[in-house]
Amino acid sequence: MFRQSKWHEQAIFNLGRSGRRGHLLPKIEEGVKNAVGDLNNIIPETMQRKSGLGLPELSEVEVMRHFLRLSEMNYGVDSGFYPLGSCTMKYNPKINEQLAALPTISMLHPYQDETTVQGILEILYRLERWLAELTGTYEVCLHPAAGAHGEFLGTLLMRAYHKLNGEDEKRSEIIIPDSAHGTNPASAAMSGFNVVVAPSDDDGCVSLGALKAAVSEKTAGLMLTNPNTLGIFEKNIDEIARIIHEAGGLLYYDGANLNPLLCKARPGDMGFDIVHINIHKTFSTPHGGGGPGAGPVGVCEELAKFLPVPRIAFDGKRYHLDYDKPHSIGKIRGFYGNVAVLLRAYAYILSLGREGLEEVAEVSVLNANYLMKKLKDIKGLTLPYDSEKPVKHECVFSAKPLKNETGVSALNIAKRLLDYGLHAPTTYFPLIVEEALMIEPTETFEKEELDRFIEAMRKISEEAYANPEIVVKAPCNTAVSRLDEVKASHPRTMALSWRMYQKKSKQNL
Amino acid sequence: MEIKRQMMREIGIKSIDELYADIPEKYRLKKPLNLPEALPEFQVKKHVEDLLSKNETCNYVPTFLGAGCWPHYVPAVVKEIVQRSEFLTAYTPYQPEISQGMLQALFEYQSMICELTGMDVANSSMYDWASALGEVARMAARVTGRKEILIPKIIHPERAKTLQVYAEPAGITVQQIARDAESGLISLDDLESKISEKTAAVYIENPSYLGFIETQAEEIGKRAHAHNALFIVGVDPTSLGILKPPGDYNADIVIGEAQPLGNSMSFGGPLLGIFTCRDDMSLIRQMPGRIIGLTTTLDGVSQGYCMALQTREQHIRREKATSNICSNEALCAVASAVYMALLGPQGFRELGETIIGKANYAMHLLSTIDGIRTPIFKSAHFKEFTVNFDKTKLSVKEIHKKLLKRKIHGGKDISKEYPELGNTSLYCVTEIHSTEEINYLAETLREILAGR
């Protein structure tokens, strides 16, 4: 049985001792001091820090030990199976880490003279071309820091497009299927649009009837994930694109699920005008416990002029940063993107090549269908929507029967999986499936690991029927048992920082 | 291959193509895409290293650039920790019981950022300072129900542009407050003429984009609060060991850029946006981004950490969320947590002193050169300062070309950003610049301007 490390590791503020140091900094030389005079005189008295700085005081080894112990109480793709649906948790090749750490990138300043950064510009330029080729788009912008940031940019591009056509007042709605990621409606709203929800049909695809009813002259566009969050390819994509384009709207592709389509089919060919790519999913850059990722956006030719500045340009000899784009929407962040992340994606594409990327797609789909087929036999789980059709990269099960019969919910299954040393699938999403377990195995994991997961699911189902207590009280093999998430968000007990915690502790005593 | 066949048999298919049968035929790629052939690891390494070696880095060319991304030393321990697989290859800690390490590290990042800024609550990161500014404007509008934001005339143009892009769809208008001609500080008269009952927030930066310290911060805060507007401050956290933290002059929200705390520049990304506020539910509920909270296990036996206040977020609130941000810069935040723990209070004091000492030394040295005026503004400067070349016959561009030929990289040319400041460049000096490098910069500039 799995056992996660468990250190009774105190909050860092309780460690160390007054006066201890973990790192020494270069001192100011005497010559400098003599020339500048008393440093205390530079900052006016009123602006000097007078309150103490409540940081902990630790030696280097104490800092190292503390964070190493914390890392041991964490679980990553390198630890084991990580079937988090729509998150595409694949192996992150180690060579990419070494490359991203090279001083020839880490020590580059973004405002360096263009002649001194030709190497990195060449890499970024080529990466843009490759991503454009893979998605079937005309130009790619690497600026967005994450998928949601890419969505924000994409919806801003819709706004800019309609504005140039003098229709920005009129085109106030973005249509989003009910199976979409929560970021889609949030991004549309951030860009000032109203969200119109398009319901799914019984087969899990967007209902054409409902879509036709939803479009109007107010339609700015449709945001679609394809394959969608049920892992199902939107088979009516042709018709969907026609409906949206005829209504004068733009078609947006949420790239969270691009992995199964690599070198198989391209969103651009299907009529998508805007495509975002999750570099930290499809292109294997590590997710770092929440980021940094990157969310490049590809667009059709007509929208290229709206992309943020600068654009990377190549005149046949030299690369340069082009700010002269009068129609550009401006900027969505500082500088040019999460370059160290993008470099890893460049190396990944180079390592796999065209054929390797196609194999990634195929194996990810094979793995998902294998899991789906095997999990179908497990008591208490059902596969809503079209259960006979193959899925793409992920499948979504419902634990509703299990919950009705045993009281064991999808959440409980997720927690119990942790006890088996497996990460849980995404739970309670998509919203159109009750007690959802959204499972994406990716191409990374070999059949043996998939079988271990299937076996664990089977055992959990048996436990649920025989002795549900075990599952309901799970996990017991992780660093801590089940947490009180309500307490963490209740105004009376909420402690969002050490100082807030200390204040509350005093109040509640 | 055998395994693949076995799996296909189990599924009941003969070829993988069957799994793609539902994609309309015309969209299935027939021709191979124009992509490179696969390379073995060694060749990938060689290829990328060769390309990158075309770059010239500040390791070999002393570089005096800052302006939103700054060269600082990253301690070895920081690099070691962020390469731990368990942190590096984890997703967002959706399952807190198996992700305590990441959650505690992020909680400690939040807590230490609060100590530095003098605030009560911090989120676990934004993309960068610029996008944090965009988000904070929207937050201020939600909190106050007002639609106008006042910002200083002197602000990083990329930040101002990003703010504009974030603000416009929310119907927020941005106005700039004029600066005092001599000091560069915010003109209180102009502030007074622009602030009104429509003002959602007054935003200042300390130190400013051009490196000087805004000494009227407390007064500006008072005036913002007198109109029931929020007072928001943007910071460079390396200054906060010696500079008064915004919490001490009554800021409601503090944002900034934490890249200098343990993260390399990497050509401008990833960066790390700071976002903090006071302990006030009307603010906390409107914050964007992930926040980690301290809690206990359900049985109450032990402490633990989990994501808090998720009802603000997109996966629950969808179009009513406070922001769409989910993936952020978590690992950069862990790097910063390690950095802050390594330095401690004494380290931050020394970091601030070393930077301000060296920067002021450089400023002093350059000011003795004929034809150079530095700094333009009669104010205290922290690590960046303006260098004006109006009295020379050369443009900033020409001077920088000559510097580069002699293996020095000058500051950022801002003569187009602020034409009214003339032929000017923004220089940055941190703890990594040695006295020799600063002296060499001064000697070389003296030579160049003397026509040698």
Image (cartoon, helix red, strand yellow):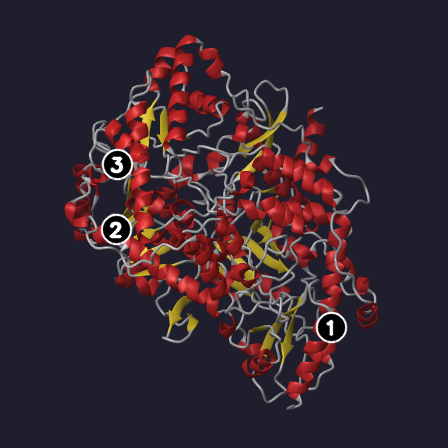
SS for callout 2:
loop
SS for callout 1:
helix
Q: Residue B445 placed where, x, y %?
A: 66, 82
Q: Residues within 10 Å of mark 3 (few under 14, many from 20)?
A: many
Is residue B362 at all visible to an observer of this figure? yes
The span from disc 3 to disc 1 (Cα, nearest Å) is: 63 Å
Query: Who is closer to the viewer here, B114 or A447?
Result: A447
Q: Residue A393 placed where, x, y %?
A: 31, 38
Q: Quadrant of residue B99?
A: top right
The span from disc 2 to disc 3 (Cα, nearest Å) is: 16 Å
SS for callout 3:
loop
Query: Who is closer to the viewer here, B3 or B237?
Result: B3
Sequence order check: which comes first, mark 2 or mark 3? 3
Residue ID for mark 1: B436
Q: Which subunit holds the residue at mark 2? A: A
Report the amino acid beneath label 3.
Ile
Query: Who is closer to the viewer here, A191 or A482?
Result: A482
Does A22 sit above or below residue B182?
above
Q: Which subunit holds the residue at mark 3? A: A
State which mark lies toward you, 3 or 1.
Answer: 1
Image quarter hosting the C terminus of chain B: bottom right
Q: Is residue A98 left or right of residue B119?
A: left
Report the amino acid beneath label 2.
Arg
Residue ID for mark 3: A232
Residue A301 is marked as none
Q: Is residue A145 left or right of residue A377?
A: right
Residue ID for mark 2: A266
Q: Residue A151 placed where, x, y %?
A: 37, 49
Q: Which subunit holds the residue at mark 1? A: B
Image quarter hosting the N terminus of chain B: top left
